[in-house]
Image (cartoon, rainbow, N blue to C red):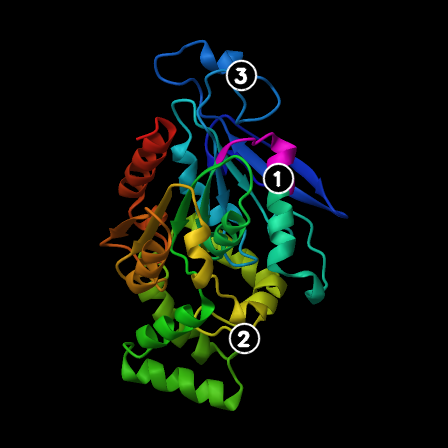
Amino acid sequence: MSDPGDIGRSSREGYLPFRDWRTWYAVVDGGRPQGDAGAAAAAPAGGPGAAGGKRTPLLTLHGGPGIPHSYLDPLAELAHDGRDVVFYDQVGCGDSTHPHDPSLWSVDLFVDELDTVRAGLGLDRVHVLGQSWGGMLALDYAIRKPAGLASLVLADTAPSMAQWVTETARLRAGLPEDVQRTLAEHEAAGTIDSPEYAEAMMAFYAEHVCRLDPWPDCVERAFAALEEDPEVYYTMWGPNEFTCTGSLKTWDVRDRLGEIDVPTLVICGRHDEATPAIAQTLVDGIPGAELHIFEHSSHLPHAEEPEAFRAVVDDFLERVDVGR
């Protein structure tokens, strides 16, 4: 199991049954709401989102698919003033069960798991923050109009894999010529598992996935875990961030964005592989959606500009909670 200290103080963790497997979760306690010293103590034990003065909790959906939650650990700081933050590892990665059957991996499976987590933790009313693939999952979930969904935070994500592929191809074309040549030569030769290809691929990642050097430990741990068990990622996505050959290749909800009827904040980095153009598609399609672009970030602004990220998300959640 993960070290609770990795994701903040006063956290509790455990497992929820899901089909034939177990889903690992952690709840970071937000403490007492400001101005109500007795509210937290009055909250029922049935779940982090229960009544009794606690603010609406935030449920986080990690990316990949198949990259465990650990790279989202900085979001634990959003747990304060009575708002709990909930993490979980989707089945197939992290501390959850790793069944090995490529036929299992589908959007519907992960929507079902999301419902199971909400029910198991008593998250009757909840904010949902989805990052990258987690944002795609959040979009698909919101379109189904689940009860009690308070808001969406769509971070570094896309409503269409076709648009993602187009935009990442444009970004790749901006890499140094020798890097582009190395990528193309190894792809043509079928040697993308070579060290030379991996080095060239990291040139893209350093520009458009995480611009920090070195990468934060939480990000390194998540990518190391992906490397140990890439089945879900390879099956649904593909061999890397700019090559989609998996089952998500045809996923596209652009024509259904207008059905989303909850307050929505769209976030991306200026240098994000989920580009500002993709973010604008989300904003244009979702009624009333807001957009915030982090100027000094790529795909992980929650890690690249953590304080600014927390301020933007905190403000949005607070405004939703008080009805502004």
In terms of depth relative to the viewer, which is nearer, 319 or 273?
A: 319
In primary-sequence order, the first of circles 1 and 2 is 1
Q: Among all residues in the image, which is located at the extreme left?
A: 295
Reading the image, the residue beneath label 3 is: 43
Please give the range of residues in magenta: 116-126
Reading the image, the residue beneath label 1 is: 117
Q: Is residue 92 visible?
A: no
The mark found on residue 245 in the picture is 2
Q: Secondary structure at mark 3?
A: loop
Identify the image quadrant of the C terminus: top left
Badge 3, how many Cα within 10 Å: few under 14, some, many 20+? some
Identify the image quadrant of the N terminus: top right
230 left or right of 70 in image: right
In terms of depth relative to the viewer, which is nearer, 214 or 181?
A: 181
In terms of depth relative to the viewer, which is nearer, 247 or 223?
A: 247
Residue depicted at 38% across the width and 29% down the height: 321
Residue depicted at 34% across the width and 82% down the height: 180
| 137 lies above or below 24 | below
Q: Position of residue 314 (x, y in %)?
A: 33, 34
Q: Is residue 118 magenta?
A: yes
| 320 lies above or below 192 | above
Q: Position of residue 299 (x, y in %)?
A: 36, 57
Q: How many marks do you count on the picture?
A: 3
Marks 3 and 2, Cα distance to the nearest angstrom?
A: 47 Å
Going by the numbered disc 3, the residue's amino acid type is Ala
